[in-house]
Image (spheres, rainbow, N blue to C red):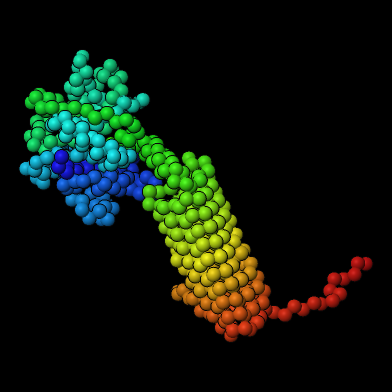
Amino acid sequence: MSSPHIVILAAGKGKRMRSALPKVLHPILFRPMIHYVLDTALALPHASLTMVVGHGEDDVRKHCENYPTVQFVKQEKQLGTADAVRAVAPRLAGKTGSLLLLSGDVMLLRPETLALLLESHAQHKRACTVTTAKVPDPTGYGRILRNATGDFTEIREHGDCTPSERSVDEVNSGIYCFEIADLFPALERIDNRNQQGEFYLTDVVKILLGERKKVGTFLLADPREMEGINDRLALSKVESWLSARINRQWMLEGVSIQHPDTVLIDTTTRIEPDVVIESHCTLIGARVSAGSYLESNCRIQNSEIGRDVRIKQGSYVEDSRVGEHCSVGPYAHLRPGTVLDRDVKIGNFVEVKKAHFAEGAKASHLSYIGDAEIGKHVNLGCGFITCNYDGTHKHQTVIEDHVFVGSDSQAVAPVTIGRGSYVAAGSTITDNVPAGSLALSRGRQVNKPNYKKKPG
Ligand code: UD1
Ligand code: CA
């Protein structure tokens, strides 16, 4: 069996989404849906990979820049699925072998399932194999019609079906395998005399049968794999199913997930065993090492969490690295460029941006630390703030190892607080502090005795 040419249809407008965004770019678990289809296609051996684009072409191409092997073909006007396939004729018509046709809005199909489809197509030496499924609610799908002896005769679109044909529960998934030599001549014979006035690819079935070509079906074991995303209801349904599939896999691999239906983990996240994820967490492009614990309502995005870390409730970690044995939160915000070495503590209501905390450093309460280098075992008291922005530029604060900063202090950057120094509570540090000093910059307390008048 030679590798098939793969074609993905993605030129349609997706009217039913009621959106300015082309349908195939709508995100599912934080990635455009077309990326999933491309990943599936690339997981299969293939002779070529072509995507038919049209509506929102520039946007769609731009979002596929990370897939350099895809070739694009433009469908000038969206006249229907048969017309879309016709657009690849100049590229493929003379070729031999099979064409696997995927749809940009059917993204749960697994490569394993498509491999079975290709096998069935080759084994039965068919001109066309239609992937079908039996679904509880066939509304909107093309129905698989059969004669009295059960032979497949044609696909009829929902809008063109009689009431009794509408009760057929076997439907067309929109995923097919064709022999290239049979497909392109048959496409030329398709007309648009139907309820939608479109050139339906589905009509190819009765044309091929009329030419005494072999046509058959491949029934999916799990009908969810073929769910087509036509509106936002289907979008949310497919996202839930994908999420359940991903979470199930992580649980089987040793990750505990509390209330998995509230936890969203994207396909690019990697998690080691013995991680615990409480409810309502979101992980996007995260790496979480063994033994770490994410309390509820955390979002970890493009970040690495080392071993045995605790991310406490409600924390948001983006484009950051958290070393082993750290504790973050509750309600902490690690913004891009935060790097925490091991044993760092970032406490409640602390915001960190572009800052490096060396081993054992702490900012336990209510702080903002931006553009800073924090040394080993530094203790930043409650309410410490780096004043890093002068209205035009950002400046660096350097706090060397073993510094103790008292509560409610500020460092007006650029400024360096030398190794082992102390900053008295309530100080505003504007000048560099030499190592080993006590810096004190607040008004002295004055007590005025007998200030309050005696009664009477
Ligand atoms: C199609 C099938 C239907 C099947 C369903 C499964 C036809 C006529 N109908 O219906 O039998 O049950 O898929 O999901 O094929 N597209 C283009 N250019 C066009 C029109 C569509 O590229 O001119 C693309 C769309 O972007 C989409 C795919 O083809 O990726 C399917 O089109 P869509 O309009 O969603 O077809 P359905 O009505 O879902
Ligand atoms: Ca569809």
Q: Residue furthest right?
A: 456
State how many labels appear.
0
Q: Nearer the viewer, residue 29 or 113?
A: 113
Residue occupying image coordinates x 60% and y 76%: 402
Q: Quadrant of the C terminus?
A: bottom right
In the displayed structure, 133 sits above or below 111; it is: above
Residue 178, position as x, y percentages in the image: 15, 35
Residue occupying image coordinates x 55% and y 51%: 295
Residue 221, position as x, y percentages in the image: 32, 30
Residue 381, position as x, y percentages in the image: 63, 69
Q: Residue furthest bottom?
A: 434
Q: Nearer the viewer, residue 72 or 151?
A: 151
In the rendered structure, the answer to whether residue 131 lies left or right of residue 384 reads left
Residue occupying image coordinates x 8% and y 37%: 181
Q: Nearer the viewer, residue 140 or 319?
A: 319
Asked if residue 273 can be seen in this view, the reply is yes
In the displayed structure, 409 sits above or below 250; it is: below
